[in-house]
Amino acid sequence: AIVAFTTARYGSPLVATLGGLSILVAGLGALALAVVLRRSVFIDALTLVPADWSRTLVALQDRIGPAVFLVVPGLGAALLAVPWLVGLVLRFRDRATVSEAGLEQAEETAARAQRESEQAHEIARLRDEQARLARDVHDVVGHSLAVILAQAESAQYLPDDDPDRLKATMATIATSARSSLQDVRHVLTVAAGEQPGDVAPR
């Protein structure tokens, strides 16, 4: 019984299969041996008892003998088959547990890969927005500074006796700077996800 349980529980698939077949073969062999030897063994036993007991045993043997010789090998095979089946059930249960653990690990790995993929997409999106924001700010500031620089340089060549033209040039510079500041604020506001009117101009 211990060997049958061990082969089914811990043996390789081939060993477990051979263990079950050996139990079946042993049961059939015991049954065949019992049928063949039943008569001779019983007759030998009659020589050990008195004559009146022998007649009684012969009658009893004719009535229940075949059943006894069929039940005993069957019980012997069952004593081996039950531990073998228990070992087989435990073997399949362990295999199912391992399979379930592997499935859970695979699902966890897939979920982690999904999260990493989403994080990578989010990082790429943020980098694209950062690059676009940098380009927009560069374009706005670059254009405004070019206008301001041109106006400032032209102011150096204005005659000293024409303050009106100098004031007009300075006003143009101030207007360009104010417009540039508003454009930069607008770009930053849109990048932050706010409405352009949410930020009051200064």
Image (cartoon, grey):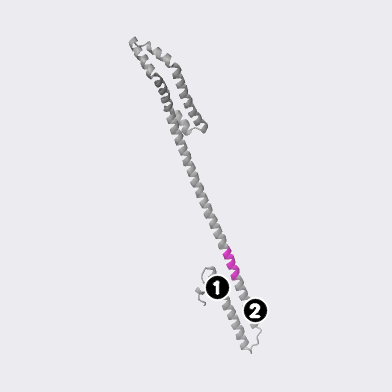
7 magenta-colored: no
Q: Quadrant of residue 136?
A: bottom right
Image: 86 above or below 121: above
Q: Position of residue 134 (x, y in %)?
A: 59, 68
Q: Position of residue 188 (x, y in %)?
A: 54, 70
Q: Quadrant of the N terminus?
A: top left
Query: Which is nearer the eye, 192 or 42?
Result: 42
Q: Which residues are magenta?
A: 128-137
Query: Which is nearer the eye, 6 or 188?
Result: 6
Q: Is residue 77 left or right of residue 140?
A: left
Residue at label 2?
150
For badge 2, the amino acid type reads Ala
Residue at label 1?
186
Q: Earlier in the sequence, mark 1 or mark 2?
A: 2
Image: 62 above or below 76: above
Which residue lies at the image location 58% right of the left edge and 76% below the top edge? 180
Q: Secondary structure at mark 1?
A: helix
Q: Quadrant of residue 158?
A: bottom right
Which residue lies at the image location 48% right of the left edge and 33% below the top edge? 10
Q: Give the label, 1 or 2, closer to the camera.
A: 1
Query: Within 10 Å of the Cα at label 1, are there few (<14), some (14-19), or many (20+) other Cα atoms?
Result: some
